[in-house]
Amino acid sequence: MRLILLGPPGAGKGTQAQRLVAKHRIVQLSTGDMLRAAVAAATPVGLRAKSIMDRGELVPDEVVVAIIADRIDQPDAKRGFVLDGFPRTVPQAQALDRLLAERGLKLDGAIELKVDEGILIKRIETRVAEMTARGEKLRADDNPDVLRGRLVAYRAQTAPLADYYARKGMLKTVDGMAPIDTVTAAIDRLLSPAGVGKAKAAAKKPKPAQAKSTKAKPAKAKTKATARRGSKAGRKTAKSVKKPAKKKSGWRKSTTRRRLTKAG
């Protein structure tokens, strides 16, 4: 099983990743952990990443993908893995697709934990207040302003991944605001054979119905038989109409001649 967890900072991806690892006996691949491990092992790609980080620069995508490629080739990743923190952008997702395709592998799904950002900020504000009241040391990420900045970056760079995987029919969504055990149960249902089938069916959008044409059908051409019947009917009608008789004027002339002869 090969999965990706999506969701903003504070959504609980780390907790759910650990539960998936325990349940399915797969490995959790964190880009930060993999970078540190590659640097410590002094692998060729690890040394390259170290030189880049020593200059204070961001590790480019191709180096991160190379580190992931080395990691998934290790024996403990053969059963599968859950990626935590990668991909962060659509180009990284496309690079991951190419990497897996080269090895004859594919992702089984991308699980997005949907959360309310306003509630996340309130939660961290409450946690900071409680820790401060107890005199506990705060972590660098226990800061509402830092969280706001990370949420802005997530919306700009990582949120588009949901659409990317939705178009591929791989996105599965869970209410990340639910209790931890409820979120875990929801993920288990989505990863069951029935849940996978529902996700694929939802990805197939029905085709829009075609509107019926309102154009009037052209009149049918008259057949030869119809034309002949019409012609005969026309001739019968013409015969039935009598022409007015012409007046005969010749008899008047002959009668006048006879009268004149008798008189003479």
Image: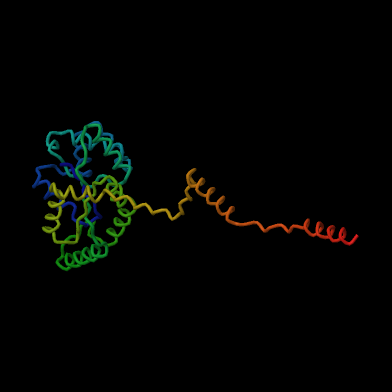
Q: Between 142 and 56, which is closer to the camera in this rendering?
A: 142
Is 94 displayed left or right of 123 in the figure? right
Q: Position of residue 43 (x, y in %)?
A: 22, 32
The quadrant holding residue 132 is bottom left
Q: Position of residue 167 (x, y in %)?
A: 29, 47
Is 213 displayed left or right of 74 in the figure? right
The quadrant holding residue 249 is bottom right
Residue 28, visible in the rendered structure:
yes
What quarter of the picture does the C terminus occupy? Answer: bottom right
Total numbered labels placed on residues in the image:
0
Residue 66, compared with residue 83, is above or below; it is: above
What quarter of the picture does the N terminus occupy? Answer: top left
Residue at 32% over, 45% down: 90
Q: How is the image coloured?
A: rainbow
Given the current orientation, which residue lies at the most extreme right position?
Answer: 264
Residue at 19% over, 43% down: 108
Residue at 17% over, 64% down: 131
Q: Between 223 and 214, which is closer to the camera in this rendering?
A: 223
Residue at 28% over, 34% down: 48
Q: Between 137 and 232, which is closer to the camera in this rendering?
A: 232
Residue 63, compared with residue 111, is above or below; it is: above
The quadrant holding residue 81 is top left
Residue 57, compared with residue 41, is above or below; it is: below
Q: Position of residue 232 (x, y in %)?
A: 53, 48
Q: Position of residue 26 (x, y in %)?
A: 12, 42
Residue 50, visible in the rendered structure:
no
